[in-house]
Image (spheres, grey):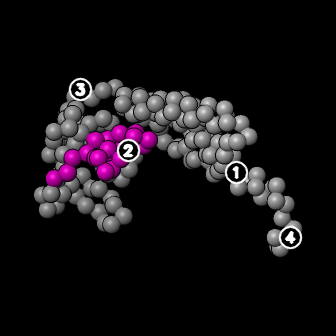
Amino acid sequence: MSRAFVNEDQAATQAAQPVERRVSDLPNYVTESGLASLHARVAELKALHAEQTALGERGDRQSMADLERDLRYFQARVATARQVPPVTATDKVQIGSWITFADEHDVRSQVCLVGEDQADAGVGLVNWASPLGRALLGAQVGDEVLWQRPAGDMRIEIVAISALPT
């Protein structure tokens, strides 16, 4: 179709509507700090929304649409959050546990299982529903579990479980 037949107002409206953020179908388990982070993110987005609203017509429509989309997403995440109790037992891996594991070459790594919105692999926070999280969940010290990775399966051994990073 030729651009001559495109309604510019309609094209501008469609461009201003951001794609909705997908909300996971999995239970929204969160740690205490994960829930606090969600609440902080909602508060931050509400403040930004208020600033944009105050600008009125001078405000950036795309930024406002993006803010509203993100606010809907994080409000839904807070509404569906299921806070897990703090880790007190270290006999088996649970959400909130810090786990030290060794791979086939005895290379050790430490991760903490958290909810999906709190996950940050760069600092060792792993989504409980990820392939690594599912392999670790429920395991005990000394257990060998199969981590099904896109790069190939790997057997890992649980070396330690703690409530805090070591």
Which residue lies at the image location 57% right of the left edge and 47% below the top edge?
Answer: 21
Q: Is residue 109 magenta?
A: yes
Q: Which residue is mark 2?
A: 119
Query: Can residue 65 be seen in this snapshot?
Result: no
Q: Determine whether the residue tagged by mark 4 lies in a helix, strand or loop.
A: helix
Percent across and percent down for residue 81 are 48, 31
Amino acid type at mark 4: Ala
User: Distance from label 2 to label 1 (Cα)?
Assistant: 29 Å
Furthest residue toward right:
5
Q: Determine whether the residue tagged by mark 1 lies in a helix, strand or loop.
A: helix
Say which of 159 and 165 sits in front: 165
Which residue lies at the image location 31% right of the left edge and 66% below the top edge?
Answer: 152
Pick whichever of labels 3 and 1 is earlier in the sequence: 1
Q: Determine whether the residue tagged by mark 3 lies in a helix, strand or loop.
A: loop
Give, as a single range, the part of the protein colored magenta.
Answer: 108-128
User: Distance from label 3 to label 4 (Cα)?
Assistant: 66 Å
Which circle marks residue 88 in the picture?
A: 3
Which circle marks residue 16 in the picture?
A: 1
User: Distance from label 1 to label 4 (Cα)?
Assistant: 21 Å
**Looking at the image, is mark 2 or mark 1 nearer the viewer?**
1
- Locate residue 100: give its quadrant: top left
Pick whichever of labels 2 and 3 is earlier in the sequence: 3
